Amino acid sequence: MSEKLQKVLARVGLGSRRYMEEVIAAGRVSINGRVAQVGERIEPTDELRIDGRKVQFQIEDEIRRRVLIYYKPEGEICSRNDPEQRPTVFEQLPAIANDRWVMVGRLDINSTGLLLFTNDGELANRLMHPSNEIEREYAVRVMGEVTPQIKNNMLQGVVLDDGPAKFESFSEIGGDGINRWYQVVVKEGRNREVRRIFESQGLKVSRLLRTRYGTVILPRELRTGRWMELDKADIDNLTKLVELKPRQGTGLFGMAKRRTERMQEKPMAARRGGYLRQQRRDSEEGENQNPMAYAQRDRRENQNGFAQRRDNNSSNANNYAQRERRDGNNGNGFAQRGERRQDGNTYGQREQRQNSSYAQRDSRPDNFGNKGTYGQRDARDENAPRKPFGNKSFKKF
């Protein structure tokens, strides 16, 4: 089965499809030794090269289909790269060899909840396309009162800047006062659609949580900032929803399956790093913009540093006093040691032991078998013949 060339190159991870089309048009890609053309199809048995280097690839139908669910926290953006260096949802996903994760739908930086990722570009495209009318379910906290008339307006449809929009279903799920929660369902994935529908009625959304996308429901055991991989049954339900054929080898095996089972039994702690980093960055920017806050922070640091130095000086003084006392106590020890050194008997005994040891050492035979003191050996005639080492003579070559 053949596949378009730019699609294969993009899936390998060399760049986007549009960029790959530019690379092909520049004549940098070859198939079986000839320069390739934009839109050309490639077979699994063809040899693919880019800038003369061979590229290993697989046709998409032969790749194992994988799907991840991710619980997005606040403060993370749905993008691979951000010029403002904010944390992205892709930073927390596991690496995938010779492939890439494609995000299904988006959530704005202030929204949380379910995000889907897959390595199947066709599956992602069908799940996001409005013509398939895949349901997205949200839990929404609204500031203000939702009257029956407002509810009816949102179910019948309201006019937004990019066209009419409506909720497929609307129900209240709890809360009172300004902390009222509602459950809504939409079939489109337009930018900030749920928030804009409420804003059209003079209401403001304070919290937005996606709880379902198609047939996938956000699991209770999945914590904020964590991901989980779907097994074969869940993936097949998704593909059936958008009329795609199942693939061989789909599902969890080995360590991946054990990891999912372990997470269901003992969920991992929530990770809120993205939101906390964003809050900390905002506070630092606020201090930099406010010179009074910056001066107060410097004053606090100077005061803390002065207090620490004063504590260190006081501790050094105590240490010095303790050392003086130890030195005073050691004075008696020095005196006692001096008395021992002045003791004639002690030094005399030590010198006698040394003399006897030297005498015994001098009487030992040397390496040549000669007995006598070292003084006698030094007086030997240097021209006298010496015994060779061992019983064997050196071999002549």
Image (spheres, rainbow, N blue to C red):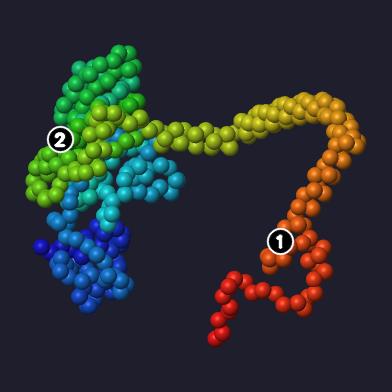
* Residue at x 25% of width, y 28% of height: 265
**Pointer 1 residue:** 365
- Callout 1 crowding tier (Cα within 10 Å): few <14, some 14–19, many ≥20: some
Q: Position of residue 307 (x, y in %)?
A: 71, 27
Q: Is residue 334 above or below residue 369?
A: above
* Residue at x 80% of width, y 71% of height: 380
Q: In this view, does 82 lie above or below 223?
A: below
- Callout 2 crowding tier (Cα within 10 Å): few <14, some 14–19, many ≥20: some
Q: Give residue 396's quadrant in the image.
A: bottom right
* Residue at x 80% of width, y 67% of height: 378
Q: In which quarter of the image is the C terminus?
A: bottom right
Q: Position of residue 116 (x, y in %)?
A: 24, 41
Which numbered disc, 1 or 2, marks the residue closer to the eye? 1
Work out whether residue 329 or residue 204 is closer to the camera in this orientation and state it.
329
Image side of residue 18 versus residue 300, left or right: left
Q: Do the residues labelled 1 and 2 touch (CB within 8 Å)?
A: no
Image side of residue 166 versus residue 388, left or right: left
Q: Position of residue 164 (x, y in %)?
A: 20, 36
Tell me the number on the disc at residue 187.
Answer: none
Badge 2 marks a residue whose secondary structure is loop
Q: Where is residue 56 in the image (x, y as percent from the top left)?
A: 24, 65
* Residue at x 31% of width, y 22% of height: 142
**Pointer 2 residue:** 215
Residue 382 appears in the rendering: yes
Q: Counting residues from the N terminus, which is met first, the one under dot 1 or under dot 2?
A: 2
**Residue type, mark 2 in image:** Thr
**Residue type, mark 1 in image:** Pro
Q: In which quarter of the image is the N terminus?
A: bottom left
